[in-house]
């Protein structure tokens, strides 16, 4: 495992262009990545930042959402791209990229977990968090800042909770824009056992990016995931949960470093 310091200078692009697919987390949309996507494109990289379902390309409704719906949508995109990509998942998106990589490992050259859930095969987010925080732990640290529907199926994040857990280091403008993009998050995915395996997903090189100021997925929880699951590389950046808004250049450099790695045989 290699650790990189938080010293970020000029960007160095891979010798050959790389395709990046950036998968957003819970409550979010693909547009959240607009700053880091622009930097990567200026470095002559190809970038996709899809909205996960529900969206205009999917018939799924909020009530239909499961991890398999997310997974199948990403796998379909990877098949359309048709070449191995660097697949990043942010926060809840970590579950999505693990699931997609299990189905189509030949289309993923590297996995990047950005302040993301990286949990063992067969586990659920609920069970994993309780092993770390204790038996009374909720599925999220933001439980007091959310509004949950009576049936427990959907949660919405309020402005104070979003600022605290998502946009702590962001400018006021970025916080307002980021909050405007948020949407209700189906809760079912937090309780579903993960179907990836070490035989398929586990063979793909993994980089984990820890954000030191993260209150959405605190560094101690990231450390527990790294101890439990493991990663080939660890990057550390001084940013909040939404580093793609608060530290896009530093994040872009970390992603370009992944793209510059030799393709794993």
Image (tube, rainbow, N blue to C red):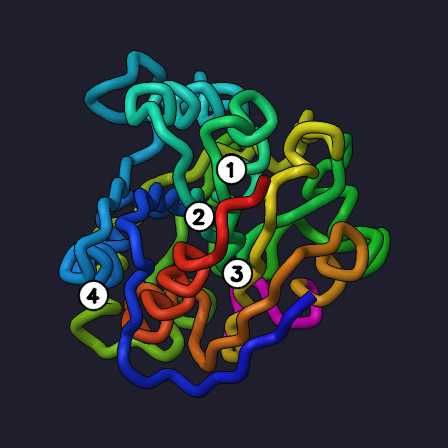
Determine which of the numbered discs, if any, sits on residue 61 in the image. none
- At x 54%, y 70%, the residue is 235
Nearest to N terminus: mark 3 or mark 1? 1
Q: Which stretch appears magenta? A: 214-221
Mark 4, residues whose alpha carbon is within 10 Å: few (<14), some, or many (≥20)? some
Quick check: marks 4 and 1 in contact, CB under 8 Å? no
Q: CA distance from mark 4 to mark 1?
A: 28 Å
Is 234 left, or right, of 133 in this rendering? left
Nearest to N terminus: mark 2 or mark 3? 2
Determine which of the numbered discs, if any, sits on residue 97 in the image. 1
Q: From the viewer's side, name the closer residue of 216 and 260.
A: 260
Is 18 left, or right, of 264 in this rendering? left
Q: Name the residue beneath numbered marker 4.
A: 176
Where residue 245 sits, quadrant-wise, is bottom left
Nearest to N terminus: mark 2 or mark 4? 2
Q: Name the residue beneath numbered marker 3.
A: 115
Q: Kindly report which numbered mark, 3 or 4, lies closer to the viewer in this rendering.
A: 3
Q: Name the residue beneath numbered marker 2.
A: 88
Where residue 29 sits, quadrant-wise, is top left
Quick check: marks 2 and 3 in contact, CB under 8 Å? no
Number of marks drawn: 4
Q: From the viewer's side, name the closer residue of 93 and 131.
A: 93
Q: CA distance from mark 3 to mark 1?
A: 13 Å
């Amino acid at each position: 495992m290699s650790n990189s310091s938080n010293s970020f200078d000029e960007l160095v692009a891979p010798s050959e262009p790389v395709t990046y697919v950036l998968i957003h987390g819970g409550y979010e949309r693909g547009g959240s990545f607009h700053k880091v996507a622009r930097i990567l494109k200026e470095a002559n990289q190809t970038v996709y930042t899809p909205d996960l379902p529900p969206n205009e390309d999917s018939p799924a409704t909020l009530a239909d959402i499961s991890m398999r719906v997310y997974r199948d949508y990403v796998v379909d995109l990877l098949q359309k791209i048709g070449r191995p990509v660097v697949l990043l998942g942010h926060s809840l998106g970590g579950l999505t990229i693990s699931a997609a990589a299990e189905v189509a490992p030949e289309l993923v050259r590297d996995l990047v977990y950005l302040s993301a859930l990286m949990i063992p095969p067969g586990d659920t987010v609920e069970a994993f968090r309780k092993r770390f925080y204790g038996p009374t732990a909720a599925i999220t640290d933001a439980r007091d800042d959310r509004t949950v529907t009576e049936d427990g199926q959907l949660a919405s994040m309020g402005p104070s909770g979003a600022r605290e857990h998502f946009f702590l280091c962001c400018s006021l403008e970025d916080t307002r824009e980021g909050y405007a993009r948020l949407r209700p998050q189906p809760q079912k995915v937090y309780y579903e056992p993960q179907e990836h395996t070490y035989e398929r997903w586990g063979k793909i090189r993994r980089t984990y990016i820890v954000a030191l100021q993260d209150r959405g997925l605190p560094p101690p929880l990231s450390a527990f995931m790294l101890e439990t699951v493991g990663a080939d590389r660890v990057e550390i950046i001084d940013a909040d949960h939404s580093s793609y808004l608060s530290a896009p250049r530093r994040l872009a450099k970390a992603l370009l470093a992944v793209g510059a790695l030799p393709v794993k045989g």
